[in-house]
Image (spheres, coloured by chain):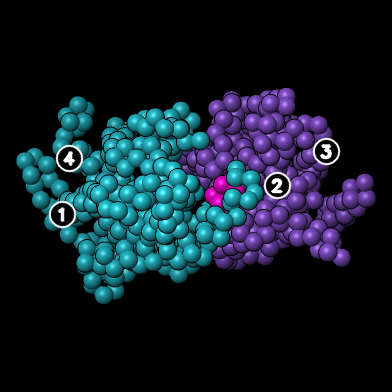
Amino acid sequence: MLETMLSGQLLFAALVTGSVYALVALGLNLVYGTMRMLNVAHGDLVMLGAYAAFWGFSLFGLSPLLMAPVIALAGAAVGVAMYRMLFRKMLGKASQSTAGKVESNSLLLFFGLSILIQNSAAFVFTPNIRGYVYLDAVYTLGNVSMTVNRLVALLVAGTLCVSIALFLSRHVLGLAMRAVIERREAASVVGVDVDRVQKLSFGVGFGAAAIAGVLMSMLEQFSPFSGFPFTVAGFVVIILGGLGNITGGLLAALFLGFIETYGVALTSANLRSVLLYGSFVVVLLFFPNGLLSKRLIR
Amino acid sequence: MQFWLGLAVFGCVVAVLPPTLGNEYLIGVALTVFMWLALTPSWCVLSQLTGYVSLGHVVFYGIGAYLVVITWGQWPLWLAIPAAGLVSAVFALVVGGQVLRVRGPYFVILTFGLAELIKFSIMAIESGMGMAARILFGAPDLLVIYWLMVGLAVISVLLLGWVSTSRFGHGLRSLRENEEAAETLGVPVVRYKLAAFVLSAVIPGMVGAVMALRSTYFVVEQVFDPLVSVTVIAMALLGGGDGVRGPIFGALFLACMSELLWAKAPLLYMILLGGILVVFVLLVPNGLVGLFQRFKVRE
């Protein structure tokens, strides 16, 4: 038992899962942080990204990695379009009526969107489970053997997370984004174009989700209903890591990856969902302010 | 008063008609309609009045169904069905203290996550015991199930009617508008929320128990299907308003629609459900009742 626990194989698997979660959560964090709306449909973008990679690969033989930037741009375009069509209006209304009800309602709106996306996808793509084989050569380092696609997923997700984190801490637009996340009113007072920042965060967030989908499609099988667990994982991560706290989010994502991988290895694969939803409920009930951040949610 | 009289007459006609015609398909359809008429008002007791929107109402339904299934053959029905309501209520009481401290959108996803957690846990327990599915032999006659469900629907509507006009109900509404202010003015906020949560859990527990008798074939995913919670919300949202009318309209309307579509084109039905959520939240937040009232005011 102890040997399995300490093996590099498991460590590697946990890192891969954690890095994909980190990418998903980063996008969710940006949208949540700037808009204060929980986007339940976030995981469905992951699912759509996975389908885009799958169809490109199986119909035209296109490499998912080469298509990833295109898919990300398409995801970003969807994000900007959704923001323009649905949420700008909703946010405008939010200031007028009672905030609590609008927040709950915005969640129902996202939930409705999620149902729409999932079932439309099932309608168009059929509800069958899909998957494809890509870069499955085995690469051995020391006593750890890993398939190339997992290695690539880890590298791509890791690089993207780090570059987004750098963008947020170095670039002017990234700084503006963080300003909106931290103090919305104050940011608009000092001249940050809040509308533009929100549009940008929808774009970046959805783009990141779409790429996470591409990576996910290389690793496991999926169906039109595979997105929701990613949403849940994303929520666990951003709540644990602290809202708007990017470094905290990265650490929390790795933590969740470890819990899930080691939990399943210690018990059984049947318990994967129990572990995921269990950590979700525990986090919301007992650590609503995160493990790392001292800031309050409310 | 007029409304209640009309409702009573209408309800009696709708309830008596299918059994008199003796058409089994028709009884089945009416049973489903009454099931939604029982579930939706029970959801409203907490979520419509307090604004704590629960996306996990199915958890009580599933617990009730599961209790009947595991006590099948050991407990008589007159004991098992009320016990299902009681166990759901106790579950609500136990988790409520913690869960109701969470607010707004967090409460919404928390209730969803909690329902899914219970579902996956029971699935793990069942598969640990080597049970993929269970079959109930010797379930009572369809007509018995039917009248039980009609009874539950009546109780549920009366419960919402009573709560929404009572002092308790006004207290619940006050915490929807502003919880801090309500507390300052002396509304026992914590006790009221918990009471509403427990009350809203009893009926779905018993409905789940009765529906388990109806299907006789028990699969965990089916009795804990999040679709039940979503449908209930869509019905309440569709009806809108702030009382008994909205949920009744919404449930009748959508139940008939689902009867037409669910069996034949389940995906289309789901797309429609998602569409209803999006359109009503964005454009008709007060539902059909609100729309109707606005119409009347204009005239």
Numbered disc 3: what chain?
Answer: B
Q: Nearer the viewer, mark 4 or mark 2?
A: 2
> Chain A drawn in what color?
cyan
Is residue B26 in view? no
The residue wearing badge 4 is A9
Numbered disc 1: what chain?
Answer: A
Identity of the residue furthest to the left in this view: A142
Contact (CB < 8 A) between labels 1 and 3? no
Closer to us: B114 or B33: B114
Disc 4: CA contacts within 10 A as few (<14), some (14-19) or many (>=20): some
CA gap, disc 1 to disc 4?
14 Å
Q: Residue at x 25, y 67 (%)?
A: A67
The residue wearing badge 3 is B165
Kind of residue sitting beneath label 2: Thr
Q: What letter labels the chain drawn in purple?
A: B
Query: Which quarter of the figure is the N terminus of chain A placed in?
Result: top left
Disc 3: CA contacts within 10 A as few (<14), some (14-19) or many (>=20): few
